[in-house]
Image (tube, rainbow, N blue to C red):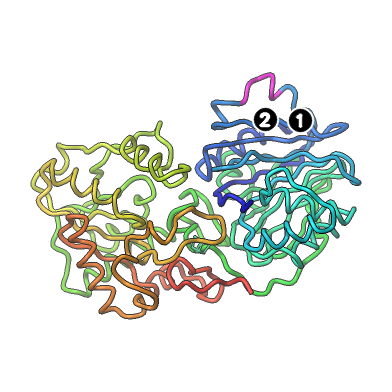
Amino acid sequence: MKSIQENCGLFGLYSSTECVQEIYQGIDFLQHRGQQYCGIATYEEGVHQVTHHGRVGDTFTQSNLDYLKGTFGIGHVSLLERQPVKWMSQLGEISVAFSGNIINSEELIHDIMSKGGSFLQGYDIEIISKIIMHEGDAVAGISALSEKVKGAYNLLFLTKNGIFVMRGPYGFRPLILGKGEGKYAVSSESRAFHNLDMEIVRDVLPGEIIHITDKGFTTVKKLESPRRAFCSFEWAYTASIDSVIDGLSVQKARNSLGSSLAQRDIDEGGIEADIVAPVPMSGCGHALGYHMRSKLNYQEVFLYNRYADRSYTQATQVAREKMAKRKLSVLHSAIEGYRIILCDDSIVRGTQIFNKVHDLKKAGAKEVHVRVACPPLMYPCDFGISTRSYEELCARQFIREGALNSMDHLRELETWIAKKIGADSVKFNSLDTFVAALGIPKEDLCLKCWDGLSPVR
Ligand code: SF4
């Protein structure tokens, strides 16, 4: 019954003209947040809805787009679940799209079933929808979520009266408002706005409920936010580098994380290498930051296959590893005899970075020194950002809880991982340098991947 954890993206638009083309483009620009399912719902005398298994550009047909009539609607891309979901309710026809993960879903399912409710699958989207519909009023229903639901969630709720938007009280996931001529939009990431000639208005605040109509944005309620817990992994990996999240450019954040890695090398005796290179694509910003701080030449050593999906957002480990192999090929002529600093965002199992180091050495690299933007991942995510488990985490085979608090332990772990992946050296940002590089107060970040502390009370 437990909901599938997923990574996903949301886009909603109210327009003075037909909205479907821009919603289609909006979710296409969020495709990096999940490639398995996509869907759009619009409103014109009822909900018109189409969902697909597959990517936006590959699945929506012209007749789908012609069917999706109306000037306002919502869209969704996902790793593991078809959304939006359409319901008949006291509010008329509605459609709901959700991003996140409910921690207490079993308890909520039990509670709803004990009162005579039933579920198709018991997915989080069903639980969320049933809680909202039970209240018979959109704002009251959305507000009820904060009393009952524990976890991370952002929500788009399409009704005949417009689109209701909610960012969960902790703000784990990004959600941002944008506008253009006669258009008011909401998106998981700002990149969709840049590419649709819209401008950023502001981030939706944690706990804020906004109503979008032809008049613009109205904050209809601000629910209590126990604390902020912005997912720090968004800046290091999940988000697109051209997005700005909660005021911090993803590009600047990655440059800063790379710069911090270079600074550590400088402080620990200097850098003896010929080039710095990324593991594309999410390593690019980190490698560029390393280059800017160290002045070491930046050079590509892998060719990125633009037709391959992100390995991390594949549904299974086998699919992830297959995709990782398809994704990168070595640029042989660029590396022979070189000592390479290789920058990546994170190490989960270590199998992918092992393959990359092996490929570079086989192609003639003299030395490969791996530099990793995130501290070693020690805990699974409970908030729907990824599907990694304890068993998958390479660092946990070596160290246990609390070990990241000591620089000596971190160095021991780095030596062990270097041996395991065949690299000449490995260095991570420590938790302190990671937080300092982001420049966001520690108490506003979720760092559960590393410290194991759940922000949810
Ligand atoms: S546990 Fe990690 S991936 Fe999940 S929300 Fe927190 S920082 Fe993000």
Q: Is residue 61 magenta?
A: yes
Q: How many marks?
A: 2
Q: Is residue 87 left or right of residue 97?
A: right
User: Is the CB–ligand 1 distance for label 1 below 8 Å?
Assistant: no
- Magenta span main SS: helix
The amino acid type of the residue labelled 2 equals: Gln
Q: Is residue 167 above or below residue 29?
A: below
The quarter of the displayed image where residue 322 is located: top left
Task: Identify the residue at image location x=79%, y=44%.
Answer: 158
Residue 90 showing in the rendered view: yes
Task: Identify the residue at image location x=22%, y=69%.
Answer: 265
Q: At numbered mark 1, what does the secondary structure look like: helix, strand or loop?
A: loop
The quarter of the displayed image where residue 69 is located: top right
| Label 1 Cα crowd, 10 Å radius (few <14 / some 14-19 / many 20+) | some
Task: Identify the residue at image location x=49%, y=69%.
Answer: 448
Q: Is residue 57 magenta?
A: no
Where is residue 452 shown, x and y percent of the image?
47, 72
Task: Identify the residue at image location x=65%, y=57%.
Answer: 153
Residue 181 showing in the rendered view: no
Image quadrant in which the C terminus is located: bottom right
Where is residue 6 shown, x and y percent of the image?
56, 49
Q: Is residue 410 above or below residue 191?
A: below
The amino acid type of the residue labelled 1 equals: Glu
Q: At numbered mark 2, what does the secondary structure look like: helix, strand or loop?
A: helix
Where is residue 210 shown, x and y percent of the image?
77, 56
| Label 2 Cα crowd, 10 Å radius (few <14 / some 14-19 / many 20+) | few
Q: Which residues are magenta?
A: 60-65
- Write down the residue under mark 2: 21
- Write down the residue under mark 1: 18
Q: Pick the residue in front: 374 or 338.
A: 374
Asked if the residue at tag 2 contacts the one at tag 1, i.e. Cβ–Cβ closer than 8 Å, the answer is yes
Q: Pick the residue in front: 152 or 190.
A: 152
